[in-house]
Image (cartoon, rainbow, N blue to C red):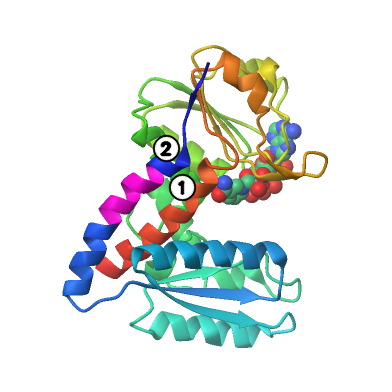
């Protein structure tokens, strides 16, 4: 039976480290503060916003939430971001995306100063994943995958890592980060031929395809560690499921993250710890 790589254990380790940093900031009169920026009333944005606020409050990070109407102009949005950039009391900014279609998302996300880009959405932050510079922050979900591997002592050096998915938010940055940890990395996407055969070769399999329970036993082999990034609502089961068919993985692989309670849990914590880091710099 596979070891279950629970996000909660990683979160509590990150939390311990974070609370020491928050204590020392508070002694210097600094309260780490996150600003959230939401456009419209999308249910998933609101739910994510609530979970972030809850997590921040639980560790002593302040939150300033701004919600703008769906028909906000790009100029108004840019003024809001400029306000955050210039507000010394705001250390990190989380902007919910996608933005409405009348707004150029590339222009808006790149208006944020990299020092406050705790979600890793600016081109500067993304470039720093590739160059290894310390400008900005890596996308939180990619970082969460690495935090899980590190916490559970899964050494990447010399290992074969396969990443399914090549998005800017998860697949591409996590592939680069795995390479940085000396893994030999293969990235698969919708045009890749025979993914099951490639995936079976992996020592570490990271799945971020957004296809509910599509990774079945034909993708798996014994000894593997599987990190399931997928979060999908299964109407029939009435619950969240991953991209990995958990019941196939459990009897075959060495270790697997659950959904829910895996990568998603750690992602929120990484985001909050980035706010603390931004406040410390
Ligand atoms: P995305 O932007 O839709 O990208 C999906 C990627 O998977 C694309 O590169 C796509 O390939 C590839 N793909 C899709 N179907 C595939 C298939 N059948 N075989 C191989 N590759 C396939 O999604 P994303 O934003 O990266 O998110 C991926 C999943 O992670 C989603 O379930 C999302 O909800 C979840 N997620 C979780 C967190 C978290 O905190 N846990 C955070 C973000 C996202 P092409 O490039 O060829 O189209």
Chain part drawn in magenta:
10-18
Q: Magenta segment: does it hold 276?
A: no
**Label 1 near ligand 1 (CB < 8 Å):** yes
Vertical relation: 126 (above or below) 151: below
Q: Position of residue 250 (x, y in %)?
A: 58, 20
- 158 or 60: nearer the viewer: 60
Report whether residue 261 is seen: yes
Question: Magenta part mainly helix, strand or loop?
Answer: helix
Regarding ligand 1, which quadrant of the image does it lie in?
top right
The residue identified by callout 1 is 266
Q: Position of residue 152 (x, y in %)?
A: 37, 31
Q: Residue at point 61% right, 17% down?
A: 220
State the separation of the CA atoms marked 1 and 2: 8 Å
Tell me the quarter of the image containing the C terminus: bottom left
Q: Would residue 23 appear left or right of 179 to someone viewing this image?
A: left
Q: Earlier in the sequence, mark 1 or mark 2?
A: 2
How many other residues sit within 10 Å of disc 1, few (<14), some (14-19) or many (≥20)? many
Report whether residue 136 is seen: no
Asked where in the image residue 29 lies, by quadrant, the reply is bottom left
The residue identified by callout 2 is 148
Q: Position of residue 177 (x, y in %)?
A: 43, 40
Vertical relation: 139 (above or below) 197: below
Vertical relation: 158 (above or below) 191: above
Q: Residue at point 44% right, 66% down?
A: 117
How many other residues sit within 10 Å of disc 2, few (<14), some (14-19) or many (≥20)? many
Asked where in the image residue 96 lies, by quadrant, the reply is bottom right
Tag 1 near tag 2, CB within 8 Å: yes
Q: Would residue 235 appear left or right of 165 to someone viewing this image?
A: right
Q: Would residue 275 appear left or right of 28 to someone viewing this image?
A: right
Q: Residue at point 73% right, 23% down?
A: 193
Q: Position of residue 71 (x, y in %)?
A: 74, 83
Q: Residue at point 39% right, 42% down?
A: 10
């Amino acid at each position: 039976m596979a070891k279950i790589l629970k996000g909660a254990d990683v979160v509590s380790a990150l939390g311990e480290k974070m609370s020491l940093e928050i204590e020392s900031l508070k002694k210097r009169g600094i309260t780490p503060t996150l600003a959230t920026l939401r456009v419209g009333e999308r249910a998933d944005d609101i739910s994510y916003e609530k979970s972030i606020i809850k997590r921040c409050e639980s560790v002593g990070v302040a939150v300033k939430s701004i919600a703008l109407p769906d028909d906000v102009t790009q100029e108004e949005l840019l003024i809001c971001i400029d306000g955050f950039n210039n507000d010394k009391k705001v250390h990190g900014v989380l902007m919910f995306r996608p933005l409405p279609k009348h707004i150029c998302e590339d222009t808006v996300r790149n208006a944020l100063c990299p020092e406050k880009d705790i979600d890793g959405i600016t081109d500067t932050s993304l470039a720093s994943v590739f160059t290894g510079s310390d400008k900005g922050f890596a996308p939180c979900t990619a970082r969460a995958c690495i935090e899980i591997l590190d916490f559970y002592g899964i050494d990447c050096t010399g290992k074969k890592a396969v990443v399914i998915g090549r998005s800017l938010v998860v697949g591409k940055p996590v592939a680069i980060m795995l390479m940085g940890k000396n893994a030999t990395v293969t990235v698969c996407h919708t045009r890749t031929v025979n993914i099951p055969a490639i995936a079976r070769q992996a020592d570490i399999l990271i799945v971020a395809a957004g296809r509910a329970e599509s990774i079945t036993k034909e993708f798996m082999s014994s000894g593997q560690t599987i990190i399931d990034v997928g979060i999908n609502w299964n109407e029939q089961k009435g619950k969240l499921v991953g991209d990995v068919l958990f019941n196939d993985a459990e009897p075959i692989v060495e270790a697997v993250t659950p959904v829910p309670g895996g990568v998603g849990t750690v992602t929120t914590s990484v985001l909050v710890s980035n706010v603390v880091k931004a406040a410390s710099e």
